[in-house]
Amino acid sequence: MNNFNFKNPTKIIFGKGEIENLANEIPENAKVLLLYGGGSIKKNGIYNKVTAALNNFEVVEFGGIPANPEYAVLMEALKVIKTENITYLLAVGGGSVIDGTKFLSAAAVYNGDTPWDILTQNIRTEKGMPFGTVLTLPATGSEMNSGAVITREETKEKLAMGGPGLFPEFSILDPEVIKSIPKRQLANGLADSFTHVLEQYMTYPIDAKIQDRFAEGILQTLIEIAPTILNEEFDYKAASNFMWSCTMALNGLIQKGVPTDWAVHAMGHELTALYGIDHARTLAIITESHYKYNFESKKEKLAQYAERVWNITEGSIDDKAYEAIEKTTEFFKSIGINTKLSEYTSDYEGTAEEIAKRFTNRGWLGLGEHQSLSPEKVEKIVKMAY
Ligand code: NZQ
Ligand code: ZN
C-alpha cells in the first residue's frame, strides 16, 4: 500500500425527513444564496421543504444552473454573491448544482481578474466561501468530495478544479428524493458511480486489501440494486443503498493508498464538451475500448474483478479479464446505456484526433496509473469507441 493522508471534513446527514433539520447546520446570521438547477425541485416538493427549513434566515435564490454547469451562468450567480453580500452558499441539486456551487465558493474569494483561470491554471482553493448541500440526485459523489467540473460553451471546454477548501460543510442525503428522478438520470447515476469505482480500482495489484474489498462491495451493491432502482415502483431500501454507494464511490476513501486511473473521465469529459452527451454515458462509451487497449497492464485487476464481482472462476487470467470487460459492457446495456459513440452522434469522424490534439495542447502527455497514456494512445482508444 502507498503512503497516504486522509481527511474528509464533510458532515453527512443521512435519511428520510432529514431536510427538515437543515437550519441546524447553517451559521446564525448567515445570508444564504440558495442555488438550484432547472426547476425539478419546485415540482417534487424539495424546494418547499428547503425554504420552510430556512424560514429564519435571510435567503436569496439563484436558479437555472444547467446540467454540466455553465461558466457564463455561474458568473451571473457570482454577481449576486457580491452585490447581495452573501456569506453562505446552499446547493440543492445533483452534481451540476453542487459543482457550480463549488466553483462559486472558490470564485467568491478569488483575487484574480478572470475566475476561469481557476480551471485553466489549476488554482487549488485552500479556503472557499462556506457551503452545504441538499443532494437530489445520487451519482457524482460531489456531495462529499472537493472536486468540481465546469463547462464553458463558448470554447466547448469542460475542465476540473478542486482543493481542500471545497468540501461541503455538510450534505443532507434523503433517499426519498429519488422518487422523482427520471429513469435516464437513475441509469446515469448507476453508471457514473460504477465507473468512479473502476477508475480507482482497475489499475494494478498493490495488495491494498481493504480498498479492493470496499471497491468490490460498492460494485456488487450497484449491480444488485440496479434492477430495483430502475423499476417504476420506489423502494426505500434500494434507494438508501444506491445513495450511499454513490457517495462512497467518490468521497476519497477507496482511492487512498492505491494507484488511480481517471483516463476514462478525461476522455469522457471531452465527449460531453463536444457533443453534450450525458457525463455517465460518455464513460460507458470509453470504458470497453480503454480496458481492451490497456489489457496487458490491467489484466490482473480485471481478472480479480471477474472473480470477485462477476463470479467468473473458469479459465486463464486473460480469459477471465476479457470476460469481465464484456460483463461490464453488458451491465451498461442492461441499464439502458449505449456504449458506442456512433449511437449518440453521426458526426463522430475526427473526434479522436480532436481530443488527442486538445490533450497535447494542455500538456496532458501521460494519463493513467502509469502516466503513460499519451495523446496518440488516447486517439486510438477513442477511435475504438466509435
Ligand atoms: O436541473 P434540474 O431541474 O434540477 O434537473 C436535474 C437535471 O436535469 C435532474 N434532477 C436532479 N435531481 C432530480 C432531478 N430530476 C427529478 N428529481 C430529482 N430529485 O437531473 C438532471 C441531471 O442533473 P445533474 O446534476 O446534471 O446530474 P449529475 O448529478 O449526474 O451531475 C453531472 C455533473 O457532475 C459532474 C459531471 O461532469 C456533470 O457535469 N461530475 C462531478 C464530479 C465531482 N464533482 O466529483 C465527478 C463526476 O465524475 C462528474 O464529472
Ligand atoms: Zn463521473
Image: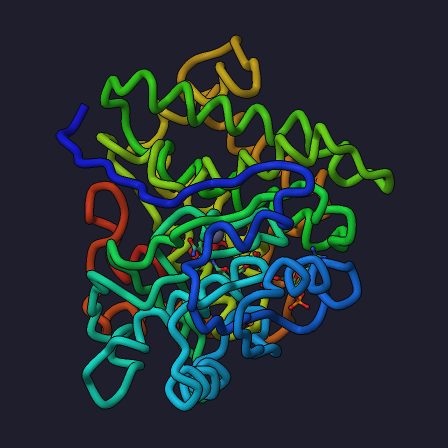
Looking at the picture, how far across and down is residue 362, in whole percent? 23, 72
Which residue is at 44% across, 36% downward? 197
Q: Quadrant of residue 377?
A: bottom left
Say which quadrant the C terminus sits in. Answer: bottom right
Which residue is at 52% across, 42% downward? 193
User: Which residue ends up furthest to the left in the rendered image?
Assistant: 3
User: Which residue ends up furthest to the top in the rendered image?
Assistant: 314
Which residue is at 45% across, 42% downward? 196
Q: Is residue 66 left or right of residue 271?
A: right
User: Which residue ends up furthest to the right in the rendered image?
Assistant: 233
Q: Quadrant of residue 379?
A: bottom left
Q: Is residue 64 left or right of residue 271?
A: right
Say which quadrant the N terminus sits in. Answer: top left
Q: Nearer the viewer, residue 382 or 163?
A: 163
Looking at the picture, how far across and down is residue 314, in whole percent? 52, 9
Looking at the picture, how far across and down is residue 347, in whole percent? 59, 75
Q: Is residue 166 left or right of residue 94?
A: left
Looking at the picture, how far across and down is residue 187, in whole percent? 67, 47
Q: Nearer the viewer, residue 374 or 262?
A: 262
Q: Is residue 381 left or right of residue 227?
A: left
Q: Nearer the viewer, residue 41 or 169?
A: 169
Tally the numbered discs. Answer: 0
Q: Nearer the viewer, residue 82 or 310?
A: 82
| Residue 227 in the image: above or below residue 116 | above
Which residue is at 20% across, 49% downward? 372
Residue 292 visible in the current orientation? no
| Residue 131 in the image: above or below residue 118 | above
| Residue 315 in the image: above or below residue 271 | above
Q: How is the image coloured?
A: rainbow
Residue 251 visible in the current orientation? yes
